[in-house]
Image (cartoon, rainbow, N blue to C red):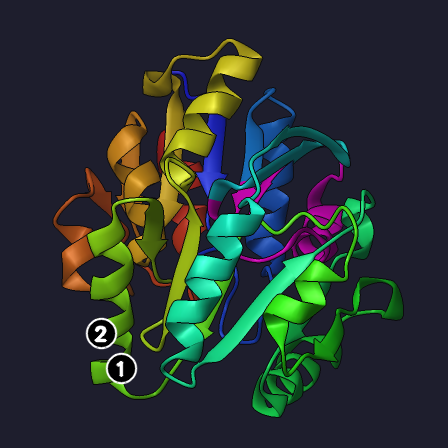
Amino acid sequence: MNYKLVSVDLDGTLLNSKDEIDNRTAALMKKAMELEVKFAMCSARIYLSTQYYNMQIDKRQPVITNNGGLITINEKEVFSNPLNIEELFEIIDIAMAEKNDIYFSFGNGDISRNCVCTNKITTINRINSEYNQIVPPEFRIDAKLVKEPITYIQNTNNAKIYKISFIDENPIVLKRINNRLRSLNKYEVTSSEANNIEVTQKGVNKGNALEKLAEYYGYALDECIAIGNDKNDLSMIKKAGLGVAMNNSNSFIKQYAKYITQRDNNNGGVAEIIEKFILS
């Protein structure tokens, strides 16, 4: 098969445990691009924090962010599906009832200047220590402490919020929130880490975003590869012609993959796919 589009998750997939794209993988991606293969970084992250990595490869490449809520090509928005105001308030109310750590990002028309709002200082500290310290100033995330998220959103004009996330170290609390949201049958509910829940519009997920991007370029899904490692990657792994689970994926994800890498994200798992299925 002549694959034309690769949708690749960031955390736990393309990025190693140091939050880096290793030099060999980057070189192989660029070599594949010379054959007109496109790479779409596909992440739960907001636009700004994916751009730091996309600029290292080729800023003209497509980017899928917010679990499929926003698709950009060459830094221009081509697809956008934010949550509406009623949905936002309903989701936040469910989390606030559990005194949960909520965070969301928004922008007012300028996708490059998204900020993250959270009701817990611990999330701000995590953003500053795990992300802002390792990237240049122009890619740092502006993290705001917002004790009353609903009031804050009401006072923010034209805010686009694609995804709301909850963090809790108590799995019982997360399960309760998860079950409540799923019972409404109005949202996409997934996770990218063991201790979080991520909520988007119904139908907004990585798999549907991959399908929209393939259609944009005129590619069949059979001509697409999707590589991931966590629950929010499942939709694209199932939808792509070649769905790949990283070696470091959990067993739940692996059972749906057509191929499981021999290497993990710290040892060139994505490079393995490029060599085996694109450059061979």
The disc label shown at residue 274, or none: none
- Residue 130 in the image: x percent, y percent? 62, 81
State yes or no: residue 232 in magenta: no
Return the residue found at the far right. Answer: 138
Amino acid carrying label 1: it is Val
Secondary structure of the residue carrying tag 1 is helix
Between marks 1 and 2, how big is the CA–CA gap?
5 Å
Rendered position, 143 above or below 7: below
**Closer-to-camera residue (80/154):** 154
**Closer-to-camera residue (29/116):** 116
- Residue 137 in the image: x percent, y percent? 87, 70
Q: Which residues are magenta?
A: 41-67
Q: Quadrant of the C terminus?
A: top left
Q: Is residue 279 visible?
A: no
Secondary structure of the residue carrying tag 2 is helix
Q: Residues within 10 Å of mark 2 (few under 14, many from 20)?
A: few
**Closer-to-camera residue (139/141):** 141
Quadrant hosting residue 3: top left
- Residue 66 in the image: x percent, y percent? 54, 50
Amino acid carrying label 2: it is Arg
Residue drawn at x 70%, y 68% as measured from the top left: 152
State yes or no: residue 47 in magenta: yes
Return the residue found at the far top. Answer: 218
Rendered position, 45 above or below 80: below
Quadrant hosting residue 73: top right
In the image, is 27 to the left or to the right of 241? right
Q: Which residue is mark 1?
A: 173
**Closer-to-camera residue (118/67):** 118
The disc label shown at residue 176, or none: 2
Residue drawn at x 59%, y 59% as measured from the top left: 21
- Residue 224 in the image: x percent, y percent? 40, 25
